[in-house]
């Protein structure tokens, strides 16, 4: 009870909830269970510091064995689900693919309202990593969310009616929004993505009441012949060379933010360069500020207070958009206000969030690109393995990083940081002929037969971990390993539990102190989203969204049930004594369909392979999240051109490519697909 009051007081002091109107402390039922007050999940990371540690302990190490399904809510989606639901006043607000918002009774799973912002399906072309959305923000009666096509929408959270909407990005550029907005100091703050397609990153604050822009912070400088938008860019401009602005420069703030209401600082993580390769982006070198950085902005003015660049001159897609988590730690006998981040580059950083001083940087996964971070200079010391200017190099971690967007959790119970990490790597080959093309990924690195041959001969290790990390001792206390590398975000609770879902469909509760598995269930779908917990009607629930996709869309996990079942998106809520059935998705038809007879020359097939790599292969792969084209039926082959060129399946999410492909290209792609289909029949994959 005291802990709950602390949490409520903390939220109230942020001015985020109207405390006089906060009914979350009022039991809504009069039965015995309702003696306990209801508890919300009011903010994206539960609290402003985004610790994702809940004070709830009804579900605990002793009782967790009784956990069962309370209810299931069907999102009606078949793409990646990455939502962190917000729960307030017994109502859950969750987002689904294509930025659709669902309001659900948090105790029963009953649908209350649904809002579809009608994102043009063609916009899926600009989403590097699926048409995902990571959640909404709520302030008083308003609900805010970003749409894939760059809008920020405010709804009345009681009925789902639109209050206002602003276009936050230039509509003629390949920007996307997948991240959740955050509320701070009467403003709603939102970033964007798109660095793979060529955009310039920025983060914007709007007035919660009107949607009027208050400030905007560009994370990289634009065309130097034009005036700087804000003085902080004077620091960044000399760190760039060449004509970076033509491909936007990147540095997109597509996910992480955290807020310290006392310091009035909003912390934002920025992404990789556009293109990935600095050789192509900034040929004269330079740090390329503020790529791959943590920036601390004054929430009132949007001006820079401090910055820390995790990967100077990023050359490897090493974003620092990963979860930013604020907590206080006693280091060398002194209590410090800390910011923790484990960005893609494989080092876990502890930074003084008042001053930006680097306190420690510790390797948390396999890496070879740097030997260590020099604490004097704050810079990583790169090894020869990182330099692919003249020769193909295997760089560890690869573009998925040592950790991606999946949130961590810091437990007050154990003082441990729970980190969903992975070992990854990639062969990097410099593309000396890089030219900016907004119709496809702009990387400045090659994916060709030479790279594929190296990868086949010496593949990088891909492996998932759950690491219980001691941020003071700077070492793991315990660790779990998974078959698939790309897994779900984390939740820890005062019940002494850590919850995580995995790509292979398991949802597990671990003892927080030693990782002992205390409860587990299995779904036909895989989990990437982070779980949340709340109390409604006197009972504690743990809820998690199912549905694979996102940046993990290329990964087929051996043994996962999703390989045999359709990717139906849903939210599953659990409670003690819950006895609803575990939902089961529809089975996939994995029989080989009859193939059409098409004659093509070897040249056509080779041309088709190139085009397939450029425009098709990222989405259409063996993970079967989106159709594996080797299983394409004869009727669909008959309309191949209509699908690819004319957008016959646009409303199903398949964009049209008539701006870059002609009928002849389409035939070449089809010939390549058929060749692959025949190969698969001759030699089925394990
Ligand atoms: Ca990226």
Image (tube, rainbow, N blue to C red):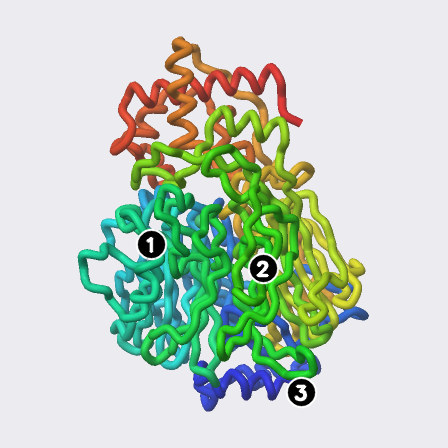
Q: Mark yes or no: residue 241 visible.
A: yes
Q: Residues within 10 Å of mark 3 (few under 14, many from 20)?
A: few
Mark 1 lies on residue? 240
Mark 3 lies on residue? 1
How far is disc 3 from disc 1 in space, using C-alphas? 54 Å
Residue pictured at 66% horizontal, 78% vertical: 331
User: Closer to the camera, 177 or 91?
Assistant: 177
Q: Quadrant of residue 552?
A: top right
Q: Mark yes or no: residue 137 visible.
A: no
User: Closer to the camera, 131 or 66?
Assistant: 131
SS type, badge 3: loop
How far is disc 3 from disc 2 in space, using C-alphas? 43 Å
Q: Quadrant of residue 581?
A: bottom right
SS type, badge 2: strand
Q: Residues within 10 Å of mark 2 (few under 14, many from 20)?
A: some
Residue 564, position as x, y percentages in the image? 62, 36
Q: Is residue 126 left or right of residue 294?
A: left
Mark 2 lies on residue? 373
Residue 607, position as x, y percentages in the image? 38, 19
Residue 324, position as x, y percentages in the image? 52, 67
Residue 181, position as x, y percentages in the image? 41, 67
SS type, badge 1: loop
């Amino acid at each position: 009870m005291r802990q709950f009051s602390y949490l409520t007081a903390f939220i109230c002091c942020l001015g985020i909830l109207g405390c006089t109107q906060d009914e979350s402390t009022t039991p809504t039922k009069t039965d015995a269970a309702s003696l306990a007050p209801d508890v919300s999940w009011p903010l994206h990371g539960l609290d402003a510091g985004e610790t994702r540690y809940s004070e709830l302990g009804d579900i605990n190490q002793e009782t967790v064995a009784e956990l069962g399904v309370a209810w299931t809510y069907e999102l009606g989606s078949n793409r990646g689900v990455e939502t962190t639901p917000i729960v307030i006043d017994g109502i859950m607000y969750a987002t689904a693919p294509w930025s659709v918002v669902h309001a659900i009774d948090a105790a029963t799973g009953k649908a209350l309202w649904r809002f579809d912002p009608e994102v043009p399906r063609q916009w899926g072309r600009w989403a590097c990593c699926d048409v995902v959305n990571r959640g909404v923000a709520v302030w008083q009666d308003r609900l805010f969310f970003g749409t894939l096509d760059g809008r920020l929408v405010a709804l009345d959270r009681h009925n789902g009616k639109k209050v206002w909407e602003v276009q936050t990005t230039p509509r003629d550029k390949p920007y996307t929004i997948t991240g959740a907005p955050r509320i701070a100091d009467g403003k709603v703050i939102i970033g964007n993505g798109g660095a793979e397609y060529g955009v310039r990153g920025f983060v914007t604050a709007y007035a919660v009441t009107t949607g009027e822009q208050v400030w905007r912070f560009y994370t990289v400088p634009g065309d130097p012949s034009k005036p700087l938008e804000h003085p902080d860019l004077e620091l960044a401009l000399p760190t760039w060379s060449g004509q970076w602005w033509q491909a936007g420069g990147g540095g997109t703030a597509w996910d992480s933010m955290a807020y310290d209401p006392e310091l009035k600082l909003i912390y934002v993580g920025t992404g990789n360069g556009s293109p990935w390769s600095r050789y192509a982006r900034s040929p004269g070198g330079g740090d390329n500020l503020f790529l791959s950085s943590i920036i601390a902005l004054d929430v009132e003015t949007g001006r820079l207070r401090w910055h820390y660049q995790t990967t100077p001159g990023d050359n490897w897609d090493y974003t620092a958009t990963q979860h930013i988590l604020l907590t206080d730690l006693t280091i060398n006998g002194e209590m410090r206000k800390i910011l923790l981040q484990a960005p893609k580059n494989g080092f876990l950083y502890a930074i003084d969030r008042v001053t930006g001083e680097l306190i420690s940087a510790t390797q948390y996964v396999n890496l070879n690109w740097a030997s260590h971070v020099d604490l004097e200079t704050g810079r990583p010391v790169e090894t020869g393995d990182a330099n692919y200017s003249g020769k193909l190099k295997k760089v560890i971690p690869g573009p998925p990083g040592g950790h991606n967007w999946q949130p961590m959790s810091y437990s007050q119970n154990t003082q441990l940081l729970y980190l969903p990490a992975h070992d990854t790597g990639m062969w990097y080959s410099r593309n000396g002929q890089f030219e900016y093309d907004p119709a496809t990924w702009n990387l400045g690195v090659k994916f060709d037969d030479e790279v594929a041959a190296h990868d086949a001969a010496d593949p990088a290790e891909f492996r998932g971990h759950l690491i219980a990390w001691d941020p003071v001792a700077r070492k793991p206390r315990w660790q779990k390993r998974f078959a698939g590398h790309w897994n779900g975000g984390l939740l820890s609770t005062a019940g002494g539990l850590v919850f995580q879902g995995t790509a292979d469909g398991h949802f597990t509760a671990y003892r927080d102190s030693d990782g002992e598995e205390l409860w587990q269930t299995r779904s036909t779908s895989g989990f990437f989203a982070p779980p949340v917990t709340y109390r409604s009607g006197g009972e504690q629930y743990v809820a998690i969204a199912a549905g694979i996709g996102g940046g993990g869309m290329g990964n087929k996990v051996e043994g996962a049930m999703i390989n045999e079942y359709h990717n139906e998106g849903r939210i599953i809520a659990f409670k003690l004594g819950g006895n609803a059935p575990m939902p089961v998705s529809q089975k996939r038809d994995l029989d080989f369909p009859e193939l059409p007879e098409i004659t093509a020359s070897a040249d056509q097939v080779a041309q088709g392979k190139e085009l397939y790599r450029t425009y098709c292969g990222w989405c259409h792969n063996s993970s079967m999240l989106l159709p594996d084209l080797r299983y394409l039926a004869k009727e669909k082959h008959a309309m191949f051109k209509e699908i690819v060129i004319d957008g016959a399946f646009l409303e199903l999410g398949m964009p049209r490519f008539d701006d870059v492909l002609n009928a002849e290209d389409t035939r070449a792609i089809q010939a390549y697909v058929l060749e692959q289909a025949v190969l698969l029949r001759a030699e089925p994959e394990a």
